[in-house]
Image (cartoon, grey):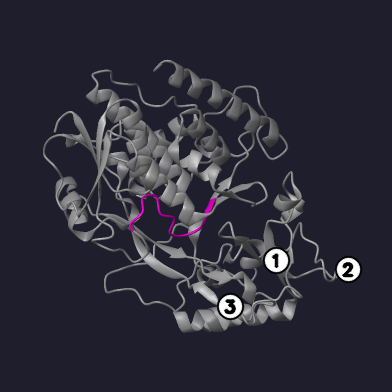
Amino acid sequence: MTQELHIVGGGMAGSEAAWQAANMGVNVVIHEMRPKVETFAHRTGNLAEMVCSNSFRSDDDEQNAVGLLHWEMRAANGLIMAMADKHRLPAGGALAVDRDPFSESVTDTLRALPNVRVEYGEITELPSDGHWIIATGPLTSSALGAAIQAETGAERLAFFDAIAPIVYAESIDMDVAWMQSRYDKGETEEEQKAYLNCPMNRDQYEAFIDALLAADKTEFHEGETAGYFDGCLPIEVMAERGRETLRHGPMKPVGLTNAHKPDEKAYAVVQLRRDNALGTLYNIVGFQTKMKYGAQTEVFKMIPGLENASFARLGGIHRNTFLNSPTLLDDQMRLRSRPNIRFAGQVTGVEGYVESAAMGLLAGRLAAAEILGKPLPTAPLNSAMGALVHHITGGAEAKTFQPMNVNFGLFQPVDGLKGGRRGRKDRYKAYTDRAKADWQGWLDAQS
């Protein structure tokens, strides 16, 4: 057992960790409880299933921190990025994927490796020996969560994550809606028309906000409190923060021209992004919700162009679990009280598919190197990978620790560059140039 790497959870982080470790020559066992034990959000037993958005966000590796993380994962022969590129959908400057073929390809690729096996069933206790990575994600089972809580002596932190609805394309009124990426972003016509847009005038927007605020919402269980992650707020929570919040967020009308009425400026715009390669499904961008199902259909059909919409999936809300990692994990992502166990992915307090997979990549390499007797230093601080892992394992304030996306605010300043918005382009390019050099150096030292 000591020469095998056991990975609990076959999501983004667990799948990437398994791929990295297996390619370093280590035998890997992936323990996945689905489909034997289901969750609220998952639909299949496939590895790396996408349960919320189908977007990996910006693919700009010079001016965007998540795009830089894409670059670093590609440089490290990352499985998640390779399969995302293989099943890429038009999405302007973003990397969106056809979710079902993507997860099927991840599953098939890992299963084809001779030194990887998948065992289906729930792990309910923290193992006392062997090499383990816990990558159970935000929907860690209650039994394993209780075991983690008992070991750490700390209350599990939790926040609530909401899922956006998906609409059948054939039910959208294209006499009202039009295809365009914001600011016509993208190198091809397909990319420049990757989003479907539904315009609202002021009266329609105000009526929509009224309906959002009045709609029936999912109730929390006794003792639960709604600590949402700001990057995935339900739309009705955004509306409660101010009537103009949505119009300056996911419904902002900028960078778009109504193809049906080019001289008419929309007061707000709802965007939908293609969710599969066939173009038969579209998800409503930024429309995570905790409204009850009946209320969702009523409210969303108020959107011009969606009056007769049919929904392949309605939105929902679920509890996410994450560790207070700054107090519990060392810089090798090991549990301080049980160093044979590493944690990776969203359960560590990173937010997003890309960040979760990145932490899996790092944990897989660190664990495999330890098993092979050639321990690695953690990722360089000035790389995106290093900035993120440093934040969750000690850089963040433990008392106020919350899930974090990768962002340039986690990076050390570059000497001699101006701060503020005017110097941002040069500053971001300097961050990404430095990160790429440091990350490639870290990889080259392992070859």
The amino acid at mark 2 is: Asp
| Residue at numbered disc 1 | 197
- In the image, residue 165 sits, relative to residue 61, either above or below, namely below
Which span of residues is magenta-colored? 45-55
The residue type indicated by label 3 comes to Phe
The reply to whether callout 1 and callout 2 are in contact (CB within 8 Å) is: no
Q: How far apart are marks 1 and 2 (CA)?
A: 16 Å
Q: Does the magenta stretch include residue 127?
A: no
Q: How crowded is mark 2: few (under 14 residues within 10 Å), some or many (20 or more)?
A: few
Mark 1 vs mark 2: which is more N-terminal? Answer: 1
In the picture, residue 279 is in which quadrant?
bottom right
Report helix, strand or loop for mark 2. loop
For image coordinates 69% across by 35% down, the residue present is 425
Amino acid type of the residue that numbered disc 1 sits on in the rendered structure: Asn
Residue 12's place in the image compared with 389, above or below, is: below
- Sequence-earlier tag: 2 or 3: 2
> Residue 147 placed where, x, y %?
16, 52
Q: Is residue 446 left or right of residue 92?
A: left
Quickly name the residue at label 2.
Answer: 263
| Residue 7 relative to residue 17: left or right | left
